[in-house]
Image: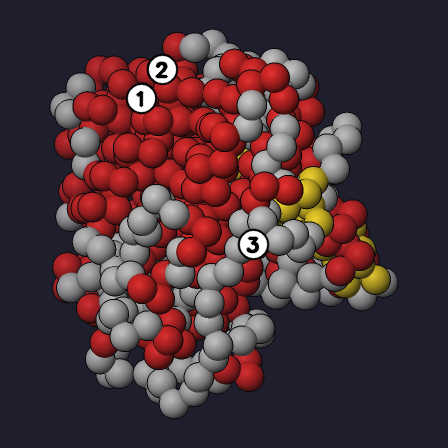
Amino acid sequence: MKTDYKIKYTVQLLSLCFVVVFLNSCSDYLNEQPISQPSNVTFWRNGEDANAAVAGGYSQLRKALNSGLSYYAHGDLGTDYFSTEKELRSDFTDIMKFKLGISVAVTDNWKPMYKVRDFSIFYSAIKQADLCLKHIPEIPKEEFTEYESQYNQYIGEAYFIKAFSYFYMARVWGNVPIIDSSDPDVVDIKNYKREDVAKVLIKATEDCQQAIKHLAWDYNVDTDKVVRANAGAAWALLAHIQAWSGNYAACEAAAGNVINSNFYSYIDRNNYIDIFSGQSRESIFEIAQNSEKEAQAGNGQSLTNYLLRGEYLKTRLNEKETIWQYDLTTLKQTLFDNPNDLRRTKGFAEFSSDWPILLKYSKVMYASPTSPLSINNIVVFRLADIALLQAEAQAAQGKYTEARTTLNSIREKAGLEESNAANDKLFEAVIQERGRELFMEGHRFYDLVRLAREKKVYKFGDSSSNKITPSQFENGKSYWPIQPTLIETNILFTQTEYWKSEAQ
């Protein structure tokens, strides 16, 4: 890869953080405005300041997941969901082919490949959380309207933001820096090296356990529901961390805590799309999209722009093709081969065509007549996800009866018959069910990685190519390279091992 360019790179968060006007919706909660103040003394005064600071952490997390459509680029695009034969019309083509080592000039830093290889924005979220953990305890108790509940909520959310950020980066890049949080006012990741992924996962686990200690199951106000972390979100995160770590007994237990809480319930699959309108009773954690603010700013890399057409997108009203092309073999023969599957009949329009339309993300606003903007929240964790993760954990432990029962409960809701997979194929069957249930929800790539690790079954690629071969997987190709400009500004950084060679 070329490294003959330079970019000024720093992670700078003012210690005063963000001021947020919290009104009556999750969008208003995230309408933060950066301000300048000489010191923390003038900011960390009361519960409202603490609330605003925590909101700043979520805002940074949202920016990280939206940058270059990272949440979907990392989790879905480089998988068997998409064709590499026909998808030649967007800046995401190389991501879909999993050709991640290409050079991108600094003048093209707007391109998705540049953005999705840059993990620095996650450290903005981590630093914001650390500032909360440092300064919220300094606020006098009497400055909170309900000290104990508010204090625990804000502290728990800060730990959750940290845990989620470290876990997300561990899955994508493997080895990443672990910053010293003792003085977050002066943290700059240029002073840190990339730590082993095992240490990063331990750090994510520890922060998640701290979040669980502080968070309650319920929400202070109804508008906070699922767009702010609660105990259920923290347990769901811990279940995913343990699954990724290969600790399936702990994963099963954490998932069980979510399911047995009875705090969440399933949406009728005849109304499947209701989940993606946001804040449904099935959702556990979502990233709220501040639609009005972002619509005004405009967003050329909007999910709707790539997945919709015809009557669902007025900028492509007369077009018969979407920009992104699903792999039709995967879609129609592997995943949604059963015409009775409600996730197929209710989740897609024009499924029989060569260009099916996914309805999960059909909620659109327009920044201008030519700029469509997706305003669906990012549904990060939901009940069906955690149930299938529990089934995966049960299958991995040889608890086939329990795994089959859990798997079939999800299939039944979708209108499908019970799985007839043999016990030795049950783990793979659960992964495939996750591919149906969680289609384009940012999970597929990580599910396929766990399948390859656990069963040596490699389903990367599509009907025309292998995006990651078995030998490439064993050599670490599933971990992303980091943006070369990060290496140029930090002599302690080295490139991800597999991507060091230009030939790869």
Q: Residue at x 19, y 53 (%)?
A: 196
Kindly report which numbered mark, 3 or 2, lies closer to the viewer in this rendering. Answer: 3
Q: Is residue 332 visible?
A: no
Quadrant of the frame with the N terminus? bottom left
Q: Nearer the viewer, residue 503 or 463?
A: 503
- Which comes before the other along the chain, label 3 or label 1? 3
Which kind of residue does numbered mark 2 sit on? Asn
| Circle 3 residues within 10 Å: few <14, some 14–19, many ≥20 | some
What residue appears at the point 75 percent right and 60 percent down from the top-left corner?
Answer: 297
Kindly identify the residue that appears in the image at 73 percent across and 53 percent down: 294
Q: Amino acid at mark 3?
A: Leu
CA gap between label 1 and label 2 equals: 5 Å
Label whose residue precedes the other's in the sequence (3 or 2) = 3
Question: Residue 23 falls in which quadrant of the image?
Answer: top right
Q: Which residue is mark 3?
A: 14
Mark 1 sits on what residue?
254
**SS for dot 1:** helix
Tell me, yes or no, if residue 117 can be seen here. Answer: yes
Q: Position of residue 236 (x, y in %)?
A: 39, 27
* Image quadrant where residue 58 sits: top right
Marks 3 and 2: CB-CB under 8 Å?
A: no
User: Disc 3 and disc 2: Cα gap in Å?
Assistant: 38 Å
Judge whether 147 appears above or below 47 on screen: above
Q: How many marks?
A: 3
10 Å crowding of disc 2: few (<14), some (14-19), many (20+): some
Instruction: Compare residues 27 and 10 and report the one nearer the observer.
Output: 10
Which element type, helix, strand or loop, lies under badge 2? helix
Instruction: Check residue 257 in the rendering and tell me which mark sits there, or answer none.
Output: 2
**Farthest bottom residue in view:** 4
* Residue 257 x, y percent position in the rendering: 36, 15
CB of mark 1 within 8 Å of CB of mark 2? yes
Q: Work out how far the residue at label 3 is from the one at label 1, CA to CA, in angstroms.
A: 36 Å
